[in-house]
Amino acid sequence: MPKVTLLFLVVFLQSSLYSQKDFILLKADESNIIIDGVLSKEEKSIGVMVPVEYEQEPGDNTPTKVKTDVYVTYTDSYLYFGIKAYADPQNIRGQIRPRDKVEYQNEDIVFIRFDPFKDARANYIIGANAYGSQLDIRVKNATTEEDAFDPNYNTIYETKGNIVSDGYILEFKIPLNSIPYPKGKNQIWHFNLSRVYTLDGIFHRSQSQRFDRNDPCWACQVTDRLIMKDVVYKRKVELLPYISGNLSGERESSLNDPINFEGINGEVGIGVSYDLSSSASLELTINPDFSQVEADKTQLDINSAYALQYPELRPFFNKGMDLLKFMDGAFYSRTINSPSISSKIINQGESSGSIMLTAIDQTSPYLIGGEDKSYIGDGAVSYVNAFRHQKLFNSGTKLGAFTTNRFYEGGGYGNLFGIDGLITINKIWRIQFELIKNFNKEPIQDWIDSDDTFLNKTVRLDGEKFSGSATYFRFSRQTEHWDSSFFYRGITPGYRADVGFTPKNNRKWLTFTQKYEGLFEEGIISKLETSLKGDITYNYDNDLKSRNLDFDLSFVTVGKTEIKYNYDINFLRNYLGVDYKNVGKSDLTILGFPTSNLTFVTKFTFGREIAYNEDIPEIGRERSAYISLEYKIGENFNIQPSINYAKLERLDKSNNFFSGYISRFAVRYQFNNDLSFRIISEYNDFNETFFIQPLLKWNPNPSTIFYIGGNQNSIHDFNVDPEDFDPMRVNQSQFFVKFQYLIGL
């Protein structure tokens, strides 16, 4: 066979293997579709069939082991999916869950992925488990898995799940204007449908199309097309008023004093959302209530020299905020702590995207990153701006420019400017970069009390001016089994991101990572990952700060049990001018899903660590353990106990630098997908504090919410004699209520 002919045949086979399929939808009458968890003959007759016939994990585009029937149609306002997932009802895993609390690795779930602009810039994934409990995710065309997934994304859609004798039925009703899409009556969206399930104790994932594991850009491979004609765009105008109130009080000074309650503190506010087009929107909030319903899990900071970062849970700061996500923490929404007014404009165009955010913040936190520690203070009123524009050139190349600004009442500012980009050389080679410059003037305030210095300037806030820069460069190669990357990161001593999160500076990192991943259809190991990362760090005086080697090994075995081992060895770590050598420790993590009702995670840490917060830091012996369980009782009820224990012992075993634990216990009863009651209690042994937080919550969509609950706190400060401490004695008490309702106009 001639070489040219052979080459043509290979190219043809490859192109046909991952060929694009068109699904021309039939427009239906809305009155003929009922979202009730039942697929009627009429609903099936108007739906276009989408086959789900390929297994992606553990198989590699092999025939799927389960049958899934999918019917798709649309109306003027909605896109409908009706799904019959065949299975033994006894083997269906899941539970009625609050929104976004579905357990991906241990439940039967169907996901629908949309790329309306067909450019792989963002995939919008909506899903539900067999009981109709929802979860939605936004996926970026990114260089790393951590950067790609945005689990805080929320949109509005309706689902209904129903367990039947031969599987389960899921129905989706998706408003067309809930997802940004290009202008025009005739729409062509890229999409994919996937189903995850457990069979014989092994996790499986089936897809409606083939995927090439040698192409790391999954978003780029979503190429099947939904074709809809004569789509009627309906401009969305939404009002989001709320009313809230809280009553709080505490004891004066002793355990015998009564709790003195202050007057009821009430708040009202409103948010307005207006669709400028099918791909652009304007949001304005006046006196927004950004309080969090779910309590942050307390992180262990007893031996941390740097500030800790918490996830964003407030709805306003989730929509469209992927445009403000950076590798170097140039923007961190939780620095906007308590705004009196805020607004944002989001535009997701066909070849570009932009966002502009403004806010007047009443209590602005102030963070200064240092070489070996962070400095944190509570700020006052400030005026915040953030802007980013990104231009897309193809599915794997984009460039952007951004700025953040903060102006403090009474003087002082922080201005930051930057450019960033992602360049795809081919499907396996990529370059990602960020170049940032800042110009700052400190406010003259007493928010931070420190006599430390840097660049011949004080950490204390005394009106000094300074500037700095941050640089990030990553070069990566990724195939089916191998992932190699090199990155350089530099943060100068004068760098600050007043609307971001940069807990350390005066560092230059050089990092190389080599990773292997394999999936196996047979044997006791279904997935294997191992990686080696080498890291060397200097400051800007070219003093060596650390030499580090990090080894990871993980595998998934019987019962979907995942075992992870990590060994981290610091051949040298310089802290506060002192060299510490051969500081190494191991982490062993076991994550298991032995049954449909039980999930557990255990983590054990042992080795050596520096006691950072001692007057004279020194090396100690670390022994830590984290154990967490979730046990499901029926379809509605689950309990989640956990304990986090940490100890750092002196090498001579004379005593401990610290020793203690944080215990947490959560109980949740889910009446249906919208209504739940839960109680969280937590005891912190390190500072001898205790709280219990009950909450009744109604949440039919991401914006509409009603909750009533409280906080009952015990703090050690009221106990003169430590032996008399009673963690169950309430020293502070709070009751709160909120009602927020989405009104569509």
Image (cartoon, rainbow, N blue to C red):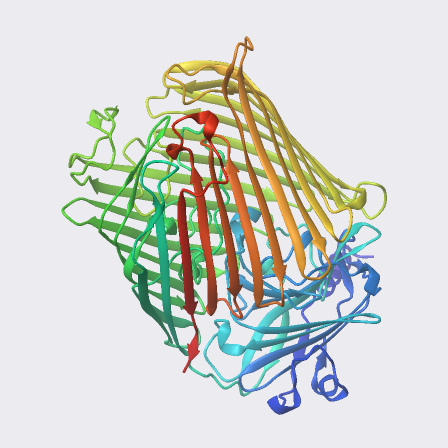
Q: Which quarter shows the N terminus?
A: bottom right
For residue 237, side relative to residue 571 (left or right): left
Estimate the x, y position of residue 432 in percent, counting from the top left: 47, 46
**Does 173 sit above or below residue 411?**
below
Q: Which quarter shows the C terminus?
A: bottom left
The residue under the point 77% across, 46% down is 594
**Does 309 sit above or below residue 233?**
above
In front: 183, or 244? Answer: 244
For residue 294, side relative to residue 202 (left or right): left
In front: 64, or 642? Answer: 642
The residue under the point 76% across, 46% down is 560
In front: 279, or 202? Answer: 202
Estimate the x, y position of residue 54 in percent, counting from the top left: 77, 62
Taking the image as drawn, is residue 284 in sight? no
The residue under the point 45% across, 14% down is 618
Q: Quadrant of residue 328?
A: top left
Determine the residue located farthest toward the front in the rendered image.
256
Taking the image as drawn, is residue 315 in sight? yes
Estimate the x, y position of residue 709 in percent, counting from the top left: 47, 58
Estimate the x, y position of residue 38 in percent, counting from the top left: 73, 80
Q: Quadrant of residue 2?
A: bottom right
The residue under the point 25% across, 34% down is 448
For residue 497, side relative to residue 568 (left or right): left
Q: How many marks?
A: 0
